[in-house]
Amino acid sequence: MKNFWFQTKINLTRLIRRDLKTVFFALFFPIFFYILYTKVFVFEMSDAEMIIWQKDYMISMILFGSMFTMIITLANTLLEDYTNQFQLFIHLTPTSKWSYFLSIVMVYIPINLMLILALAVIAYFINGVVLSIMNWVGFVVILLIGTFSFSLLGILISYGRKTTIVNVLGNLVVFPLAIIGGLWWPLEMMPSWIVSIGEKLLTNKLLILSQEWIHSNQFNFGAFFSIILWIFGLLVVMMGVQMLFKNKESDIV
């Protein structure tokens, strides 16, 4: 465990301090879209509906920002480590590949927590959005579950091994998950065939879990178990991909 935290500290220094623009863009885009769709492009609705929308879109943008960081940024970080042969160093140390992945994920969790704080402050000052301490604690737990599940997608995409492939795959995963999953616009506004797909996506399950907790302090066990199934499926796929690449990496070592 001591080695793990030491490795995490090293990763925090080499990744975040070296590349502060990662933090900037992780915070900027969700805040920009939140302001845009709650103060500029506003749908016609009652005051009560507007209050719900302002809370819901804050939740959506936090989830979107977490997804962007844990898929696109994480995948590019792992790809850069592979290109620079940093992962070769991992092979030559007692540290396991899973410990290395978890250490990288831990580095990006503070960015997601910063995003929660930033959007909470913005939502409060421009829209008067206020949540209880219990709401926030529960939502942070939900976000951490989402962070872990998104990181599995980021790790899988990093096996593209080329910048072009990783970036294309990242965009092909992130934006459909955001749009069809209901993070950018309510799912009800979309055609029925898209709704039937969107309701099954990981992002929509996280959104439902978050919204029901925020609005009524109810824990949606159906959505939670769907998320667990997603995580289990991604872990199985990830282990399969690792096995396929294991021989190749062994030859490099």
Image: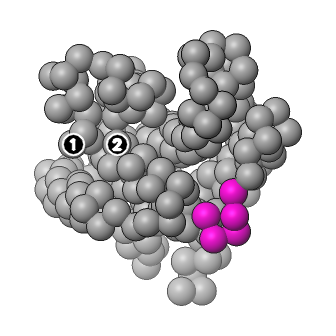
Q: State the residue position of label 1.
A: 200
Q: Is residue 173 left or right of residue 78?
A: left
Magenta residues span 131-135
Q: Residue at x 18, y 57 (%)?
A: 233
Question: Is 22 situated left or right of 125 in this image?
Answer: left
Identify the amino acid type marked 2. Asn
235 part of magenta stretch: no
Q: Could you tell me which quadrant the N terminus lies in?
A: bottom right
Image quarter where the C terminus lies is bottom left
- Tell me residue 161's x, y (percent): 34, 35
Is residue 106 shown above or below 207?
Answer: below
Q: Judging from the image, what secondary structure is the residue with disc 2 in?
A: helix
For residue 93, above or below residue 61: below
Report x, y in % for residue 80: 50, 39
In the image, 190 versus 110, the foreground residue is 190
Dot 2 and dot 1 residues touching (CB under 8 Å): yes
Query: To which residue does mark 2 refer?
Result: 204
Q: Amino acid at mark 1?
A: Lys
